[in-house]
Image: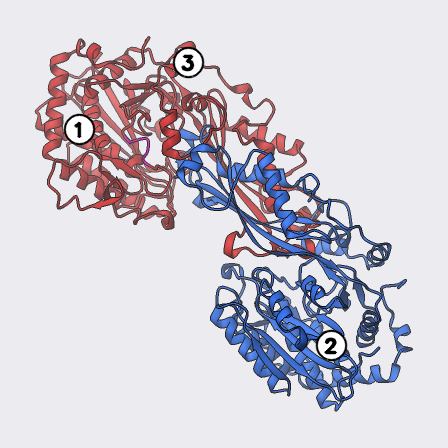
Chain colours: A red, B blue
Amino acid sequence: MNSLIVGFASLLLASPVAAATLRQQVDSYRAAHEAEIITQLDALIRIPSVAARPESLVAAASNLKDLLAARGFATESWPTVPGAPPVIFGSYAAPGAKRTVLFYAHYDGQPVTVSQWSSDPFVPVMRSGAKEVDWKSARPPFDPEWRLFGRAGADDKVTIVAFLAAFDALKVAKRKPSVNIKVIWEGEEESGGSANLPAVLRAHAGELAAAVLLVGDGPDHQSRTPTLYFGARGSLGLEATVYGPLRALHDGHHGNWVPNPAMLAATLLTQLRDADGRILIPNFADDVKPLTPAERAAIAALPPVEDSLRREFGIGGTEGSEGLTASTMRPALNVRGIRSGQVGADANNAIPVDAAVSVDFRLVPDQTPEHVRAKVEDFLRAKGWTVVSAAPDIATRLAHPRIVRLAWGGGYPALRSDMNSPAAKAVIRAAGEAAGGPVTVLPMMGASVPIYMFYDQFHGPVIGLPIANHDDNQHAANENIRLRNLWDGITAYAAMMGALGW
Amino acid sequence: MNSLIVGFASLLLASPVAAATLRQQVDSYRAAHEAEIITQLDALIRIPSVAARPESLVAAASNLKDLLAARGFATESWPTVPGAPPVIFGSYAAPGAKRTVLFYAHYDGQPVTVSQWSSDPFVPVMRSGAKEVDWKSARPPFDPEWRLFGRAGADDKVTIVAFLAAFDALKVAKRKPSVNIKVIWEGEEESGGSANLPAVLRAHAGELAAAVLLVGDGPDHQSRTPTLYFGARGSLGLEATVYGPLRALHDGHHGNWVPNPAMLAATLLTQLRDADGRILIPNFADDVKPLTPAERAAIAALPPVEDSLRREFGIGGTEGSEGLTASTMRPALNVRGIRSGQVGADANNAIPVDAAVSVDFRLVPDQTPEHVRAKVEDFLRAKGWTVVSAAPDIATRLAHPRIVRLAWGGGYPALRSDMNSPAAKAVIRAAGEAAGGPVTVLPMMGASVPIYMFYDQFHGPVIGLPIANHDDNQHAANENIRLRNLWDGITAYAAMMGALGW
């Protein structure tokens, strides 16, 4: 593939009549059902699907199962481990279809810090810019630049809503799906990286068999073009705690003598990486598989977004000197947070008792969480830290001047899969037809989705088909989905069910 | 002075009969009034004297004025600036007295982080070890190891209570004060370093005239011996903010490219100082006046406390290799707190929008806050930071890759004053007589009290006479005063009013 921006003109040659008709039919269905589709997304957001509220996750799963069953899907709810939300499976056989496509999404969302939100994360609000819109009283068609704010709306309940609306649109248009459809929707992606999903995939390998897996997670490219991706970085969380005195001490009387944990945490971080994003652990990149020429070409062909993003984000510089996507092809050590003592009006003249640092690593092929863990721990020991896994007792504290407690989160490796298989080419073609214009093809997404585990299971094409706008505030406060992205997503998903073939 | 630990035996030679009698009389008064004295301290703690509650500070001041007036003091309430708590002045003339002693204390306390306290900071609780004691139902004499927990109880309302009880004890014993007594009690020591006190001292220089000033702030030495100090480090607060993107961004998609403010804050801190407490700003120590041989001797003569403190604090090492007091003779940069993003269960996989760092500098003679400010700002500029004093607008953000906003707090210089004046010697002698045993004499306290401003005014002996236990958690949660320290403080203050002469 020479150009990864697939032009509309060339795509029309593939199957011009059917594709144009499908796009028109879906657009027509959507135009007649905009309020209904948004109402469905609004309803899903109102079921708070965060790990802190397990009962609500269970309710969300049950609701999704009902939505599939109502559309004629055979459905199952697969438990994972006690207390964890189930995996929802659905299947729909299309008479005469040769291929089966499996659609993945997750129905859980990131934790919320309510104080940082402009409105309740679980009571969706529509906004036009900063202005709230009473969309329920407005007459469609709605302004496609409106955005619906709510946790997990973009990441990624919107995928589920787009899937359902696409299915409904095909039905109204009396179009028989071109493929057998299977659905797997899980509720543990945002908490611990789908830790229980691999066992489910193994246990239900037969039911899940498919020719291609479409992963409905992640945002579209910053150029706002519909996007496909062929891999994703892996992830590994780490909570580190360093220790000062057993109780907070007046820093005038004890400063310069009693170790300051905030300073120890700053030292620890600057030992691990520099401010330009370079990880300082020797041999950390030993396991990193170089990009192929095709992957490098794909990155080089991406529309430039850096200048506009710098302005949008309000940043006067970047970490390193590469472009955004080239940067995210490397492993990363991100500091999610740091906390010690108090600041501002609450600050005491005291030496804090400890400092907590929250880190997540982003892994690239062929790094593994196990190797990264070992390299980090070995490196810290070499730097003089005593690494412990539980809160140190007094004897441990007295015996070691620099103690760091490491609590590793669930993690998983990265994947970059083949962009040149027949199924991959068919998906790229169908996506371009649905978009009626260029789509962006990424060798690997910077963010992590558990795409590796599907590959481990299927050893076949695993392709990301995201919907959400890149500026959706996913994982942060005020997460939002732009209506244009939802509308485009419905068309894309309809194409994958109704116009995919190879 | 060869030995700074003044032995009881040698002191007995000074005025054996009078001193022994005074001590016995005060002990006897205290034994008969233990519950009453604690009730007084309990009542003062219940008036929350923190900057966040200005109306309560005013109520505390008014109450203190009444307590002095009830004892026959001429009293005044001196306003400083609108909205700030007043300075309370009292004077009591002793017929025939040659000298006047001015007693300083502050009635305000540090801010509280209620969630960190075991009980309400403003509802005092007595504890024996960790066990709560119903002291109001207990029969005196109380166990002197009991401690009363509450904000500002040790730092330093206990000084006010000891002063009042000492005065009452002398009265009951029908002992005429040996000196004229003046009192200055202020309410802005813990918030911004007594910023408005210098103007009050100048405006009321005549009323405040005295031969010696006794500063009733700070804790006793860690050896638990009664303590005098002849100076204190200065102080300078700094709140620094560094900036990431305008909104929190998914770190998978943007990490390695968008600057991480937590990492920038860690970098900033490690540029300013190392984990061993060394300040890395070139020429930072240019203004530092070396210790005199007498001061060095005084420090060398201190009882060793380091091993026991290491065990008490649960620390396996110290910053640097000097002893505690030697360490606190140097300037210090303490990190009071650092805050960016979220940690633990609240952590999102996001790049935070900013990071806040709270620092306080401890100054030594002859550093000035102005010079320290200039050196820090020059150093940061040399390290590539753009130093601003207000939140940067978008144009500033886009123009500069590394912006740090510095908000300097009130600060003041340090003081080390002469330990060999006649008044100083008289105070050391009287303190030794009151203690009936060794007292500790420190050239300079590690903590900051606004002792420099008295010296600027009086150019005469300014001597610290603290009461609180060193392990009083002052400035932190669960501040507490040990009863033994309160009892010893009453005796010491009675000696300064009833047995001081030169």
Query: Measuring 62% from the left and 73% from the top, which residue is drawn there?
Result: B185
In the drawing, what numbered circle is on residue B101? 2
Q: Position of residue A468 (x, y in %)?
A: 28, 31
Q: CA distance from mark 1 to mark 3?
A: 34 Å
Q: Please, is residue B36 above or below residue A120 in the view?
A: below
Q: Which residues are magenta?
A: A468-472
**Residue type, mark 1 in image:** Ala
The reply to whether discs 1 and 2 touch (Cβ–Cβ < 8 Å) is no
Looking at the rendered structure, the secondary structure element under dot 1 is helix
- Confirm whether the magenta stretch covers residue A369: no
For the residues beneath circles 1 and 2, the answer to whether they share a chain is no
Image quadrant where residue B22 sits: bottom right
For the residues beneath circles 1 and 3, the answer to whether they share a chain is yes
Q: Chain of mark 3?
A: A
In the drawing, what numbered circle is on residue B430? none
Query: How many numbered discs sit on the rendered protein?
Result: 3
Choose mark 2 or mark 3, whichever is in front: 2
For the residues beneath circles 2 and 3, the answer to whether they share a chain is no
Residue B350 seen anywhere in this rendered image of the structure? no
Name the residue that disc number 3 marks: A296
Image quadrant where residue A157 sits: top left
**Residue type, mark 3 in image:** Arg
Q: CA distance from mark 1 to mark 2?
A: 88 Å
Looking at the rendered structure, the secondary structure element under dot 2 is strand
Q: Please, is residue A176 above or below residue B140 in the view?
A: above
Choose mark 1 or mark 2, whichever is in front: 2
Looking at the rendered structure, the secondary structure element under dot 3 is helix
Q: Position of residue B163 (x, y in %)?
A: 68, 78
In the drawing, what numbered circle is on residue A166? 1
